[in-house]
Image (cartoon, helix red, strand yellow):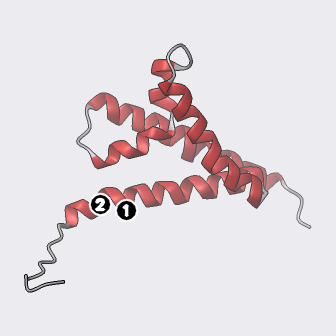
Amino acid sequence: IGSGTLVWAFEATALTPTLIGLVISMAMGAGFGMLLMNSPTAIVAYFVIPTITTTLSMIPGTIGTIGKWISGETWSMLFTPMTATQYGQAATAFTLWVVLPIALGWWRTLRTEAK
């Protein structure tokens, strides 16, 4: 609003972390869905479990430094430059929250009786 010119400048590199975060979140949701085989429970687990682990990792005397390796807080690191340790934390959290639920959910789906 006004007489100034509007400049729409966008760098493609800013989109990459967002897309990675969205793909990870979708895979995590799909993993919980396959693992729990109940949509409402999977939705609640998708939001509650990472929030609890993140909260516990911030409270002194609880899961402390281990929390950085398993908390849902790891996804926010995608938007900042990361160190080698942070890449390890992200890989560990990815394995815990995405790969493990998908693998267990796939196994459970294959063992479920067709109805």
Q: Residue at x 37, y 62 (%)?
A: 19
Residue 65 higher or lower than 112, as above or below: above
Counting from the top left corner in percent of width and height, residue 17 is at 32, 56
Task: Using residue 58 as the reference point, say whether residue 28 is left or right of it.
Answer: right
Indicate the amino acid at tag 2.
Thr
Counting from the top left corner in percent of width and height, residue 78 is at 33, 47
Q: Which residue is mark 1?
A: 19
Q: In the drawing, what numbered circle is on residue 16?
A: 2
Q: Residues within 10 Å of mark 1 (few under 14, many from 20)?
A: few
Indicate the amino acid at tag 1.
Leu
Q: Residue at x 41, y 32 (%)?
A: 89
Q: Residue at x 38, y 45 (%)?
A: 76
Name the secondary structure under disc 1: helix
Residue 105 higher or lower than 82, as above or below: below
Question: Viewer-proximal residue, 107 or 93?
Answer: 93
Task: Using residue 10 as the reference point, say whether residue 85 is left or right of it.
Answer: right
Residue 91 higher or lower than 15, as above or below: above
Q: Residue at x 89, y 59 (%)?
A: 113
Check if mark 1's residue and mark 2's residue have beta carbons within 8 Å.
Answer: yes
Q: Residues within 10 Å of mark 2 (few under 14, many from 20)?
A: few
Q: Residue 1 sits in which quadrant?
A: bottom left
Question: Viewer-proximal residue, 102 or 15?
Answer: 15
